[in-house]
Amino acid sequence: MIEATALLMVDLQEMYLPENQVRRDPLGWPPIWHFEETVNECALLLASARDAGIPVIYTRATSRTDGSDRTPAMRRLRATLPPTQLQDPTEGPSPILPAVAPRPPEVVVDKPRWDAFLFTTLEPILRNLGTRRLIVAGLQTNVCVESTVRGAMMRNFEVAVPLDAVTTDGEDLHFNALNAMRVLYVEVAPWRELVAPEAHWDRAFTTPAYGRRGER
């Protein structure tokens, strides 16, 4: 069912590019698993959604240049590192990857927390679009994707995650997060199935022990 469906593209930003890994290493964050493959699938999903008339909204991770709005844990982590190993605070938010860049009039929502609904206008934007079903794709599966999925469900949206259009900095983290979302009755499937006009989004209700069997 395409009607009342929106696509949320989460934090597909240049900060995750392999050549920018030097900024993640000091924080103890490994490279993104299957990064190029996932971005390619996100681009295909994006094209399909546009062709089908599905509204697309983007999120972009950001914070104040002085760091005053960061979480206590992030402030503490960054305080352990010399300034030369940190991103220049004057650079602003990392740009969205060109392969999946937004087109007018697609909206980009800047978010200061993992959950894209916190301290943002995402919910009224989705309500104004008449959204009931939300597909959440992008980065990272176990962080901003999962947090946003939980936030969406708490706001009574029906939610799906395309397992081939999300990833994170580790294979186990990726699949563990997908299973955690399955247990919450999130529809987890390849993106081509999720955008099909006849998609029922009923796996959670028709699959015994959904998410509790370690699906991969």
Image (cartoon, rainbow, N blue to C red):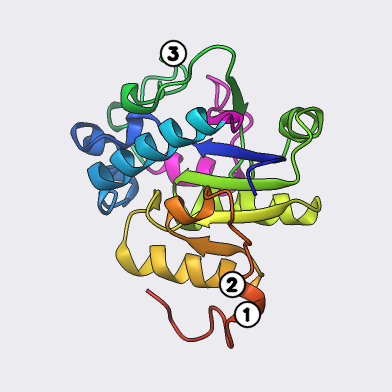
Task: Look at the picture and state if 59 lies above or below 117.
Answer: above
Percent from the top left, x then y, of residue 74? 51, 44
- Residue 168: where, in percent of width, then height? 37, 53
Label 2 with label 1: CB-CB less than 8 Å: yes
Number of on-image labels: 3
**Mark closer to the chain start, 3 or 1:** 3
Q: Residues within 10 Å of mark 3 (few under 14, many from 20)?
A: few
Query: Would residue 43 be counted in the magenta stretch?
Result: no
Three-letter code, disc 2? Arg
At label 3, the amino acid type is Thr
Residue at 58 percent across and 57 percent down: it is 199
* Closer to viewer: mark 3 or mark 1: 1
141, above or below 119, in the image: below
Q: Which residue is depicted at the point 80% across and 27% down? A: 128
* Quadrant of image for the C terminus: bottom left
Q: CA distance from mark 3 to mark 2?
A: 46 Å
Q: Which mark is residue 90?
A: 3
Label 2 environment density (alpha carbons within 10 Å; few <14, some 14–19, many ≥20): some
Q: Quick one: which residue is furthest to the front in this view?
A: 198
Specify the label residue 203 is tagged with: 2
Label drawn at residue 206: 1
The foreground one among 216 and 145 is 216
Q: Is residue 25 visible?
A: no
Q: Secondary structure at mark 3?
A: loop
- Give the residues drawn in magenta, as a range: 53-80
**What secondary structure is found at the residue carrying circle 1?**
helix
